[in-house]
Amino acid sequence: MNGLSVEGEVRERRRRADGERSRRTILDTAARLATVEGIDGLSIGRLVDAIGMSKSGVYAHFRSKEELQLATIAAAQEVFDADIVDPALEVENGLPRLEVLCERFLSHVERLVFPGGCFFASVAAELDTRPGPVRDRIAEVQSDWTKLIASAIREAKRRDELDPDTSVKQLTFEINAVLAQANTEFLLHRDRAAFNQARRAIHDRLQALAARPRRRRRT
Amino acid sequence: MNGLSVEGEVRERRRRADGERSRRTILDTAARLATVEGIDGLSIGRLVDAIGMSKSGVYAHFRSKEELQLATIAAAQEVFDADIVDPALEVENGLPRLEVLCERFLSHVERLVFPGGCFFASVAAELDTRPGPVRDRIAEVQSDWTKLIASAIREAKRRDELDPDTSVKQLTFEINAVLAQANTEFLLHRDRAAFNQARRAIHDRLQALAARPRRRRRT
């Protein structure tokens, strides 16, 4: 098309596929590096060293450090969604989804999908005091995650899986707290016990808030 | 002493006091900077810019970046101890001490004693994947804090303030989780609601684990 011959079309398609592949390579490396060395250290020069691509090769994809950082966050979010969110969206909203979200998150950290654990916890800790579009994007991703947990809790109340007096905000805070703590402790002490402590904390909390069978409520 | 005249002694004492003051200035600035820009970015060059001291002036105190980083951690720990640990050690061990530890920690973060919130959470998140003596020191400080919380819980069980079946490790994990989450959420969203959510979580957890009065246990 655009007057290209069949051969020209094939070449053009290959060129685009190569471009897409090299962009992927850059972003995968960038996301992994960001969880170890920080997203702020993610200069184009640092990536050139890590991938062994030419500076102009990286510049062809990202014109500035900020553009590279935002694209890295988007790439990390794709990984996070595919590994944690999508499997949870396949089960019913309410307690079943809440449990999958928590379990997939813990498994994601334990499998070290990113070498620095949860990408967003890592980058949030780094950028929390540095205003700008990169930090804002991280805060948005965190808010979306919080909304997903809150929605599952709200639905669990509606389905009588949790006590109707349960505070959605409070329980969301508590669940996020233990998930984040498992990530922190595992990374700092390399002790897998943190995962079971998180599981037990969530289990105990949900048990305590489980809706009592209606017939017993009358008493 | 050492054959110094009285005037010589006074000069020597002044020189030492000046040295101590400039070391303090360097470390205070370093600790604050570390919670914003990271402890790894804490080069002697960066400090020279921030304090406006000569490079040789800073080098007179710290001969390497690692020496500077370890001294910065020690300085941050002094601040942390004076602000959080010492007031808690003044009250009885058990629930009273546990409550002061939690309350002082939350207040420490809220008052932004360090601009990046909890110094140790900030630096731990940065260094968790980077082995070395600086990271080891941070892990030790975190372990000391955990032991302090655990000791208060253990004593609370002994004093019948908490159910004797309470798992010290599990409750320590849960309390640390909500304290850390208050720090994280406050820094990322600048929302003070996180402090009250942490207070409520701790209060609810301690209530649920409160030792039942002995006479009721028989039933």
Image (cartoon, coloured by chain):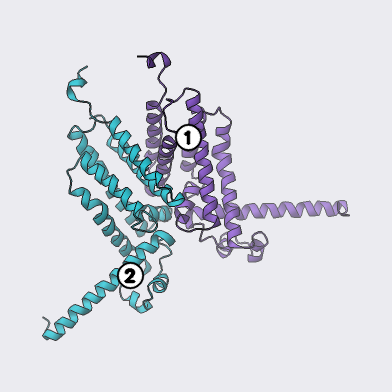
Chain colours: A purple, B cyan
Image position, residue A101 (x, y; %): 50, 35
Considering the numbered disc 1 on the image, is that residue within a helix, a strand or a loop?
helix
B211 on left or right of A121:
left
Q: Position of residue A169 (x, y in %)?
A: 44, 37
At 68% from the left and 62% from the top, the residue drawn is: A60
Left or right, A113 with respect to B125, comes to right
Q: Note whether A96 is above or below A124 in the view shown.
A: above
Instruction: Categorize mark 1 by other alpha carbons within 10 Å: few (<14), some (14-19), many (20+).
Output: some
The chain to which mark 1 is attached is A
Q: Quadrant of residue A193?
A: top left
Q: Which quadrant would residue B123 be assigned to in this image?
A: bottom left
Q: Mark number for residue B26?
A: 2
Q: Amino acid at mark 1?
A: Glu
Q: Nearer the viewer, residue A176 or A75?
A: A176
User: Residue B136 bears which disc, if any?
Assistant: none
- Is residue B125 visible to the viewer in this orientation of the structure? yes
Q: List x then y, in percent, for residue A208.
A: 37, 27
Tell me where residue B194 appears, x and y as whole percent: 40, 44
Kindly identify which residue carries mark 1: A103
Indicate which label's residue lies in the foreground, 2 or 1. 2
CB within 8 Å, label 2 to label 1: no
Helix or strand or loop: what does disc 2 sit on?
Answer: helix
Question: Disc 2 and disc 1: Cα gap in Å?
Answer: 45 Å
